[in-house]
Image (spheres, rainbow, N blue to C red):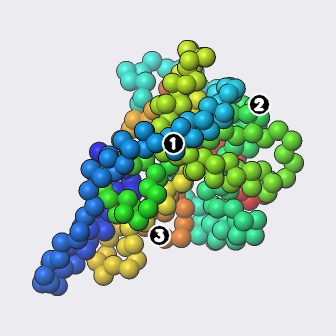
Amino acid sequence: LADSWTLGLISKQIVHVYSQLKNSAYIQEKTEYSYEQYIQNEKQYIQSEKFKKDEQYWKEKFKTIPEIANIQTVKENIAIKNEFDGKRKMFEIDANIVENIKQYCKEVNISVYNFFMAIYAIYISEISNLNDFVIGTPILNRTNRKEKETAGMFISTQPLRINLKGINEFSEFAKNIATECMGMLRHQKYPYQNILEHVRKTNPSQPNLYDILISYQNSKTNRNSSEIPYRVDWIFNNNVADSMQIHMFDMNDEGTLNIAYDYKISKYSDIDISNIHNRISSMISQ
């Protein structure tokens, strides 16, 4: 089991060894950190005061339960063999637009992740007519250099609660998102399953806290600094757990930004996804 950060580590190691073989150099084995240490750390965390503080944070965050946001479509549900059957539709944001986004983020002191989360949150709010809802988001969950050099499954998913009440300016909302994300990151080690179990004590029929997931993948392969020409592609496995998962990434460090929409074919069509992305692109331009 591994996360996408691990795949970046593996890619770098393969290219490193290949380069040494090509140059008939002595292959130096890297000192690898063991995933076993992370498992031990997790066991200690569950018994710690930090765990109790994190638990209290999430209990307070979901003292009330918002409605689950949806992007509605006109597509009729069709009979399918597997409810997780999905498709991926890819788009690319031009490098010039990405550079403009980075410049804007620098001016208002937010991250590119905050920017896109704010854009999609506003769209979801408008389309679902909700001001208070949750978007799922994967968290790297690697808190130090040692963990960032360790292969394994660290990533977890956290529920980001969105509130647009009383917001008039985009920059104000984006900064609120940034603040909310900082709080989420401070308590990221607490498992999502525990949050859900707490919610279900008062709402037994609650299936999930979100049905839309948004991720910003910052894993790089460093291929531009390699003497071996190669590129990395992310292959979709045609299965998706949520109605829609939106992934932003530039694994090959090309300056552009790929946006992948992974969606359930029982709910969305190819045209639906194109329409959604066209509206998002228009919002970004504005």
In the image, what residue type sits under mark 2? Answer: Asn
The residue that appears at 63% across and 53% down in the rendered structure is: 182
The residue that appears at 85% across and 53% down in the rendered structure is: 169
Dot 1 alpha-carbon crowd within 10 angstroms: few under 14, some 14 to 19, many 20 or more: few
Measure how far apart labels 3 and 1 are at the Cα level: 40 Å
First reached walking from the N terminus: tag 3 or tag 1: 1
The mark total stands at 3
Location of mark 2 (residue): 129
Secondary structure at badge 1 equals: helix
Where residue 76 sits in the image (x, y, percent)?
57, 21
In the image, what residue type sits under mark 1? Answer: Glu
Location of mark 1 (residue): 49
Tell me if 73 is positioned left or right of 129 in this view. left
Labels 1, 2: front one:
1
Asked whether residue 133 is in view, the answer is: yes
Where residue 44 sits in the image (x, y, percent)?
38, 44
First reached walking from the N terminus: tag 2 or tag 3: 2
Location of residue 114 (image quadrant): bottom right
Tell me if 61 is positioned left or right of 25 in this view. right
Where residue 239 sits in the image (x, y, percent)?
39, 35
Measure how far apart labels 1 and 2 are at the Cα level: 39 Å
Location of mark 3 (residue): 253
Measure how far apart labels 2 and 3 are at the Cα level: 37 Å
